Amino acid sequence: MRPIGPRGISEGTGVAVLVVMTVVATASVGMTVTIINDDSNEYGADFSFEYAEELKHLLVFYDDGDGLRAGNLVVAGPQGEVTWAQIEGLAPNETVEPNNLPTRLAPGNAYGAEVNEEDYIEIRYYPEGQRNEENDDPFEEAESVLLASWNEPSEGDGEDGPVEAPES
């Protein structure tokens, strides 16, 4: 029998353990960064915006993602909410697919107003079965998925609004 020396493991084993630990650490950090930076929504919808300053129109491009029901795709801004179907003159049950033709938010269509450079615009989707057709507001009490937004909301857009101080 060979006597046991002062070394507990061979040099090769030590190097192999260090290599495995390095690969595992690198993979876990890489996966964490990938998951954290995943800004996509469950529909894979990707929108882009182009502002026409002279006309005060906002062009909305549906660049990538699943087909979405036009009547459930809502554009919301300071002037109110309208569906993609209303803006484009589509039937509410028609499907909107990604393409290179923009939808325009302008006074001459269902949006009905100019878009200012600082306006906050949201694109939201109400999943199937969320509409209540018998109600005046078919999306009342329905939960939406935020697909995209243009600009950041201003401080005055909070739900509580300004608070008035009581008179003394």
Image (cartoon, helix red, strand yellow):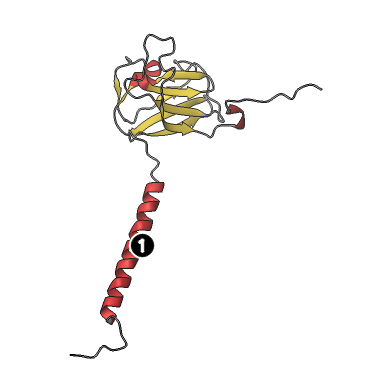
Q: Quadrant of the C terminus?
A: top right
Return the x and y of residue 21 as percentages of the image width and height.
33, 67
Please determine whether, in this image, residue 166 is positioned above or below residue 37.
above
Of residues 150 and 37, the one nearer the viewer is: 37
- Tell me if 158 is positioned left or right of 134 in this view: right
The residue identified by callout 1 is 25
Residue 65: horizontal and vertical position, in percent?
31, 34
The local crowd at label 1, few if under 14, some if 14 to 19, many if 20 or more residues have their Cα within 10 Å, is: few
- Residue 4 lies left or right of residue 155; in this view the side is left
Q: Nearer the viewer, residue 151 or 164?
A: 164
Image quadrant where residue 83 sits: top left
Q: Residue type at mark 1: give it.
A: Ala
Q: Residue at x 28, y 89 (%)?
A: 5
Q: Measuring 53% from the left and 19% from the top, which residue is drawn there?
A: 79
SS category of the residue bearing label 1: helix
**Quadrant position of the N terminus in the picture:** bottom left
Total numbered labels: 1
| Residue 161 locus on image (x, y percent) | 62, 25
The structure residue drawn at horizontal position 31% and vertical position 85%, both measured from the top left corner, is 7
Q: Nearer the viewer, residue 5 or 167?
A: 5
Q: Does 24 appear above or below 143?
A: below
Find the residue positioned furthest to the left. Answer: 1
Residue 167: horizontal and vertical position, in percent? 79, 21
Q: Residue furthest right?
A: 168
